[in-house]
Amino acid sequence: METKLNELKSRLTEVYELRCVTALLNWDQATYMPEGGAAARGRQMAVLEKLSHEKLTDPAIGQLLDALQSDEESLPYDSDEAGLIRVARKEFDRATRVPAEFVAEMTNHFSDTYQVWIQARPANDFSMVKPYLEKTLDYSRRFAEYFEYDHIADPLIDAFAMEGYQTETIRGLFSDLREQLVPLVKQVTAQEPADDSCLRQTFPEQQQWDFGLKVIRELGYDFNRGRQDKTHHPFMTKFSLGDVRITTRLKENYLAESLFSTIHEAGHAMYEQGIRVDLEGSLLAEGTSSGVHESQSRLWENIVGRSRGFWEHFYPQLQETFPEQLKTVSLDTFHRAINKVEPSLIRTDADELTYNLHVMIRFDLEVDMLEGKLAVKDLPEAWRERYKRDLGVFDPGDRDGVLQDVHWHFGPIGGMFQGYTLGNILSAQYYEAALKAHPEIPDQIRQGRFDTLHGWLRENIYQHGAKYTAQELTERATGSPLTIDPYVRYLKTKFGELYAL
């Protein structure tokens, strides 16, 4: 068994390393690559994705997995070896359904589409991306057709969001959450909106940048194994467990943009930096799902980063950084400003109460496109109608409408957006479990101490990497499967206090 396992590990390490190199090219394309490199970059990434796919689907890996099947039964379920075999079998079975040529072709297309999107959005011109998006929809459908499914979106959700979750599961979860959220949103928005003018002054970019770096260093982001750069749409990426990078974007006239983007991406990065180093090079050395990954970014960004206790520690330092802008602004005013509830056009700027409504809109539109009920050419108008109906906001343009998110322009349609709401739900469930184990965490946050919370997350979430599914990890960490109850309690408590409900 040891010989077979070692050979399996060796082969899978090559897949892992190729994925890391592809991530490096993606990062460069989104940060420093000149526009002239776009065409070649698409070809380069297509070659790497094809090579990675071919290595993963090598019949020798299938033979090793078959040979290890009987041995696996003798291994403890919690062992790294058993976890590696499970994950390898899952990835092998999925990958062998999809031809390598298709993977390369689709990757090249996504690279081309991203370059068009970064021009189309500032130009407010959906027509530029329309033919590319139509092709993306075709690729997304073709990907799904390689699998058996009850709904065409199911293979995309299983592959890119949460293993084992299906369209109907997501719909039911969203329905239950909407039932709880909508009345709360109405209660809060019936009041006068919080004054957030203190956030909309002139804040020099370099000072914003430096303050953001200071915050995430205190939270636990390790700059010896990471760095931050600027990009069009913030993201985290990993080239190894020793090189986990984040990006952000800044607006001189809006302080919250960079600050909370930086904390959000650092949350993703701390997850990856917290994976056990001895898992490096294996398929276990990554987060277990996009939903769990988002739980970490949203936990640090919102539950911690928008809490009053957090700012009892950091606000005096922020006032020192921007004395002219904030010296007369009280902590209460600032805290209400960063938690202002107001329906808006932009998902990434949305408050915690309305944020999930943005996700639900995108999920519904994706499903309609995949089902053939909505044509790409009609997407901008459908988008505007849903925003008008669900959030009461309207913008005739596309820059802050259908073009605002990068997701459909660097990946498939379907499988991504629901991960954000799943992450919100899980963030509260994990935080509640951490508080049960360590009731002192809120007091420590007020003192600028984050090591206990960070340590609990590292012990219960981070270190395991992909060894357990999202469902298994959640039950191990919290004692129950995913549930909306802690999230609803968190929102009702927080905004009940802020708005005296």
Image: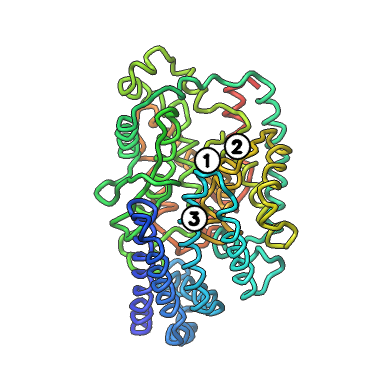
Task: Give the number of the disc on residue 116.
Answer: 3
Which numbered disc, 3 or 2, marks the residue closer to the eye? 3
Look at 73% across and 62% down and name the residue there. 372
Return the x and y of residue 294 as percentages of the image width and height: 50, 49
Return the x and y of residue 487 as percentages of the image width and height: 59, 40
Task: Give the left or right position of residue 285, taking residue 358 as reference.
Answer: left
The amino acid sitting under disc 2 is Leu
Residue under pointer 2: 345
Which numbered disc, 1 or 3, marks the residue closer to the eye? 3
The correct choice, above or below, for 392 with respect to 233 in the image is above
Return the x and y of residue 345 as percentages of the image width and height: 60, 37
Which numbered disc, 1 or 2, marks the residue closer to the eye? 2
The amino acid sitting under disc 1 is Thr
Q: CA distance from mark 3 to mark 2?
A: 22 Å
Q: Quadrant of the C terminus?
A: top right
Q: Identify which residue, 215 or 122, lies in the foreground.
A: 122
Look at 68% across and 31% down and name the residue there. 184
Counting residues from the start of the chain, the first of labels 1 and 3 encountered is 3
Mark 1, secondary structure of its residue: helix
